[in-house]
Image (cartoon, rainbow, N blue to C red):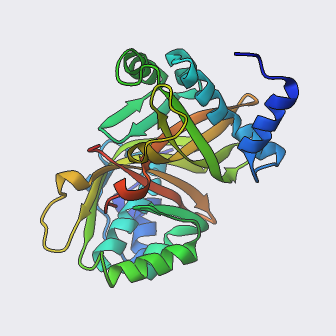
Amino acid sequence: MTTTVSPNGSKASAALAEAGVEEDFAFYRSFTSEVEKAVLTVPQLIKAAWAANDGDFFASIFVENGSLLMQDEQLTSREDIRAFMTAGYAGIYRGASVDGWPLSVKFLADDVALVVTQGGIILDGETEIAPQREIRAVWIITLVDGHWKLVSHQSSPIAG
Amino acid sequence: MSTPTIDQQKARLDAYYGSFTGEKEKEALSVPLRLVAAWAKNDADGVADAFTDDGVMILPGDVLKQGREEIRSFMAAAYAGPFKGTGVTGTPVDVRFVTDEVALLRTHGGILAPGETEIDPELAVRSTWVVVKRDGQWFLAGYQNSPRGEGATLRW
């Protein structure tokens, strides 16, 4: 049996295309199995939501009871996340984007992954991540009805 | 120091579990309890053994340890140095199951300086414990903390 998986034929490519996000093939680094790439569509979608400063898009990447820690605010539902980020993009995060890259991808179950990334926020007018805003983040990502969704995101500052 | 009675131990545990009184929740919370107990003895092996083989630990201050052995070495060095005589404490504030065998626990706590029972505000953290059940026992697949309160500066 011969199986040819072209970049445009992967589940990752399909998920990103469905969201209208251009696939960043360099993003995957060494995590290039089909399922690793599919999991890593989630941070690519989040990056795109930041680039668009789009709170609805951002929230849609989470599961319904998804959780997110922003500064000292622990958000615990998609609706809380939507409201918080929509207000943020009109305020403190206006014009901000994020960068990041995967350090590890581990499967806790067939349909649950723990991803560690490094990166950070680039505020409006900045061109790179300021040293005090460099972070490592843990992402818990799960498969829901054929789509990988974000269950939890928390960052820890690298400086400290 | 007298050994606490069974009733006293049960009262302490009930206080720790707070509103998380389901059997599954209490099982999952065995992981932070094991870690706190190991830390109280400054026992690097005990801390490392609470993790899965490939568990991850992320702390502010540029700490990223991958795998039980890296965690063991880091903790052994820390207990001989900066963490010597310290304790750790944390109150569960959230328990959520991703599957029957994967859960996220959140605690508010921090490191206790030697002899202290209250956390210095600068050391207050929000911890997330990613715990998994393996062969009937819960282990730590990922531990991470982030500053709580004034130290929680703007970041993504």
Q: In this view, which residue lies farthest toward the right?
A: B7
Image position, residue A13 (x, y; %): 40, 64
- Image quarter in which the C terminus of chain A is found: top left
Q: In this view, which residue lies farthest toward the bottom?
A: A90
Q: In the rendered image of this protein, does residue B48 appear above or below residue B25?
A: above
Q: Residue at x 71, y 42 (%)?
A: B16
Q: In the rendered image of this protein, does residue A13 appear above or below residue B97?
A: below
Q: Is residue A61 left or right of residue B1?
A: left
Q: Residue at x 40, y 17 (%)?
A: B73
Q: In the rendered image of this protein, does residue B91 appear above or below residue A96?
A: above
Q: Nearer the viewer, residue A156 or A120?
A: A156
Image position, residue B104 (x, y; %): 61, 49
Q: Residue at x 59, y 26 (%)?
A: B50
Visible residue check, residue A139:
yes
**How many marks can you see?**
0
- In the rendered image, which quarter is residue A19 located in? bottom left
Q: Residue at x 45, y 54 (%)?
A: A154
Q: Nearer the viewer, residue B51 or B46?
A: B46
Q: Nearer the viewer, residue B18 or B22?
A: B18
Image position, residue B132 (x, y; %): 64, 38
- In the rendered image, which quarter is residue A151 located in? bottom right
Q: Is residue B33 left or right of residue B124?
A: right
Image position, residue A156 (x, y; %): 37, 49
Visible residue check, residue B104:
no
Q: In the rendered image of this protein, does residue A117 appear above or below residue B156?
A: above
